[in-house]
Amino acid sequence: MKIYLAPLEGITNYVYRKALFSCFDGFDKYFIPFIRAKQNLNLSGREKKDLLPENNKGMYAVPQILTRKAEDFIRTVELLKGYGYREVNLNLGCPSKTVVTKGCGAGFLEDPGELERFLDTVFEKCDMKISVKTRLGMENASEFSELMKVYNKFPLEELIIHPRVQKDFYKNTPNLSAFAEAFVQSRNPVCYNGDIFCVEDYRRIREKFPELGAVMTGRGVLADPALARELRGGEKLTKSEFRKFHDLVYHTYREEVSGDRNVLFKMKELWFYMAPLFSDNKKYLKKIKKSEKCVVYESAVMELFGSESAVFDPENLIR
């Protein structure tokens, strides 16, 4: 079964992906967090760095596009072709209110008719592989039957289904019964996305859907960067590996991002997911969160890694 890295805005950027690829690899596809398709094609500095071929060397990287305007999507696809990409992904899953209120991400799911017209134009004018990452709907999983009728009309490279609705955000349990129906109904290859945090979660999905071709994981990888290796039967993450990975991410941010505050914002965001790797981590995590200078942060991290009470054990993640 193929394993994909989910695109998480502001987190799984090129700095994180390069470190993950360098230290662990294990993913068949690395999805790049969404770029906003614009009429003027004016990419931000962040978007440009995320897309540069040298920042995705060796990976099968797939840029994700956020828009509800077919013309902007088509222009963005042409731009991405110039970077050498062979596949793009349409974001129909982002639950963020700032995105949804503009009718993008999961907000686009509210109007299957317009979505069908969008895809009709896109597939007529684009000669690139197009996959879709979708939720089940806005309010209720019953909305997905109409959406599936739309998806089945087009030759999608893949349909990545996160079996939650927009209002769930990342709460509640993924709706596996709705996913099971969608999996049977889909005329396109299907990928499962949602709450794969450990080997047991992965095995549960494989056993329930033995013919499934791919799964995608995001938050689980943020907590355990060796997760893809473990899902393939490899060794669990070690403390020394994790320290090497952390240091690579941290020092790359120090080179790429200006100002201690901006660097530490990125690292603190990661520690929200990574801290449970250590038992009894609260006092050390508090120091990390309170640090405003890199030198203070480095001291707090060193203290955590050197602590005898804060025991490193990936099993902490599933207890």
Image (cartoon, rainbow, N blue to C red):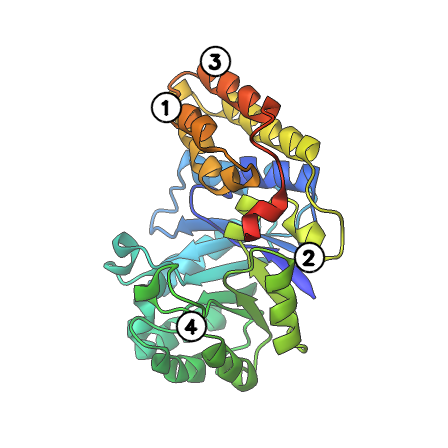
The mark closer to the camera, 1 or 2, is: 1
The residue that disc 1 covers is 290
Q: Residue 305, can we see it?
A: yes
Residue at image position (28%, 60%) is: 100
Tell me how far mark 1 sits from mark 2, CA to CA: 35 Å
Q: Give residue 48's position: percent from left, percent from top.
A: 48, 38
Please say if the residues under marks 1 and 2 sit with CB atoms less than 8 Å apart.
no
Structural crowding at the residue carrying mark 2, measured as other residues with C-alpha within 10 Å and reported as few (<14), some (14–19) or many (≥20): many
Q: Is residue 149 above or below residue 105?
A: below
Amino acid type for the residue under numbered disc 1: Lys
Tell me how far mark 2 sits from mark 3, CA to CA: 36 Å
- From this viewpoint, which residue is outermost toward the top? 295
Amino acid type for the residue under numbered disc 3: Val
Q: Is residue 316 left or right of residue 66?
A: right
The residue that disc 3 covers is 295
Amino acid type for the residue under numbered disc 4: Leu
Q: Is residue 270 left or right of residue 140?
A: right
Q: In the structure shown, which secondary structural element does the residue marked by tag 2 occupy?
A: helix
The residue that disc 4 covers is 119
Depth check, front residue: 212 or 81: 212
Q: In the structure shown, which secondary structural element does the residue marked by tag 3 occupy?
A: helix
Q: Please report whichever mark, 1 or 3, sits nearer to the chain's N-terminal start.
A: 1
- From this viewpoint, which residue is outermost toward the right? 234
Tell me how far mark 2 sits from mark 4, CA to CA: 34 Å
Please say if the residues under marks 4 and 1 sit with CB atoms less than 8 Å apart.
no
Q: In the structure shown, which secondary structural element does the residue marked by tag 1 occupy?
A: helix
Q: Give residue 37's position: percent from left, percent from top.
A: 38, 52
